[in-house]
Amino acid sequence: MDSTALCEVRDCTFAYSGEGTALHGVSLHVRAGELVMLVGPSGCGKTTVTRLINGLAPGHFTGTLTGHACTGSLEAGRAPLESYARVVGSVFQNPKTQYFHARSTDELAFPCENAGMPAPQIRERVRQVAARFGIADLLDRAIVNLSGGQQQRLAVASAAVLEPAVMVLDEPTSNLDTASMARLHGMIAALKADGVAIVIAEHRLAWCADLVDRYCVFDGGELLGTYTAREFEALPATQREAWGLRALDMSADRARIAELARAPRAAHDEGAPVFGTRGLEVGYRKRALFRRGVEFSLRIPDVDVYGGQIVGIMGHNGAGKSTFARTLCGLQVPLAGTVELGGEPASASALSRAAALVMQDVHYQLFAESVRAEVMLETVQDGGELAAAREQCDALLGELDLLDVADRHPMSLSGGQKQRLAIAVALMGKKRFVVLDEPTSGLDRAHMMQVGALLRKLAGLGVAVLVITHDDELAAHWCDRILALD
């Protein structure tokens, strides 16, 4: 092992149990105070490398490992998984998957309690971490009431509370707005200044480009090359795009978004709108016994959405975008105002029949035992012709690069594959309008553009498409209008 490296993966090949080989002979290292970014298309092996570094593979994600993956004095496959707790802090793509408590302060204290710290020391450590990472305002709050960005910041602080030598983050910005990414940048900069070795597997590159020391480019489970930050930035943009990587500079995309937000209506709008809002106020009421009033509310500007349009809905984490989406699809009753279909006020049941919703957390809407069965679920229940439905299903899966996993269980897919599967289900449903909540979360550039092209194809069939997104590249390249809810 490199004597200066805090973690090293040396000639590692790994195959998950019952699946193909995820890594082929990969070698890399990370020193104290370095930030190494793992980049490449979805399913290329980035997440598997992070699991070797934090011991989750093969300790939790079982499989066959050859080679050596060492973090400090711990070697994957040999050291017990619990021994990694003080050495490596891990932050996952969905912070909800790593919380153990209902309240934020308890969550920060939990690693210290597991480590056997006395209560006074735990309280002081929680105070120090909250001050260090600027999250004192998040203490003593219910985690479920925090925005996505706040939850991610809490997850980073919780992972750092035992002062690990190594931090591993897997797609930490996939659901974050620009302001939340800036706050996360500050937290990562603080860790780097403390001498922590940082490994980030990421698609969105611009938010911390100034902090990265080296980029490791993966594809098909192989490490194509390692580049210093200067070497990577000097590569032609076309080369990075060929690897499926996102942009390093977002200024042009953000200028385009500002232009779209000023345009009241796309030039091709004709005829009656598919749906519209009138005096709409969305939100939810207090649910505690003997309490009345509104817990959260958001007034939506009156808007008409026409067939053939892709309308982007943008705003900060917690602005109410997902609540707006649920209301449009009839899943939540508005606090005031109406949603219209074809110019007439529509009931919740009418909206649910007319709309398809692709949720931000797709785990809530995957039910079948295979990818193909998931896409065909509604069609088969409606008595459609099975052979024709399967042909259409397979064509759609082929367009989304999912045909080779058609017989796998949906829960065995990667995060990006699950997102594409949920989109395939919505496209198969032939609804009047489709609402997608962060459809490109966790997707590489190639698949983001692929999703955008499919949305354009859907809009071309006369369907109204509403996209709730923090993805500046998706919004700039594919949306006709932007409705900003800030």
Image: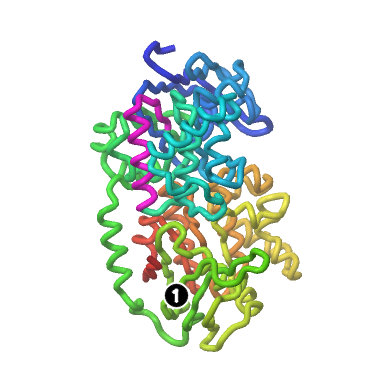
Side (left or right) of 397 relative to 289: left
User: Relative to residue 17, is residue 401 depicted above or below?
Assistant: below
Q: Amino acid type of disc 1? A: Ile
Q: Give the percent coordinates (x, y) of residue 29.
A: 41, 21
Q: Is residue 45 visible?
A: no
**Residue at the disc numbered 1:** 300
In terms of image quadrants, where is residue 113?
A: top right
Region rendered in magenta: 179-199
Q: Nearer the viewer, residue 206 or 73?
A: 73
Q: Give the percent coordinates (x, y) of residue 76.
A: 57, 20
Q: Tell me if residue 279 is in the magenta stretch.
A: no
User: Relative to residue 409, is residue 294 depicted above or below?
Assistant: below
Side (left or right) of 399 relative to 368: left
Q: Nearer the viewer, residue 33 or 336?
A: 336
Which residue is depicted at the point 30% across and 45% down?
248
Q: Tell me if residue 197 is in the magenta stretch.
A: yes
> Could you tell me what secondary structure mostly forms the magenta stretch?
helix
Which residue is depicted at the point 40% across and 54% down?
177
Which residue is depicted at the point 48% across and 65% down?
320
Residue furthest front as drawn? 120
Tag 1 secondary structure: loop
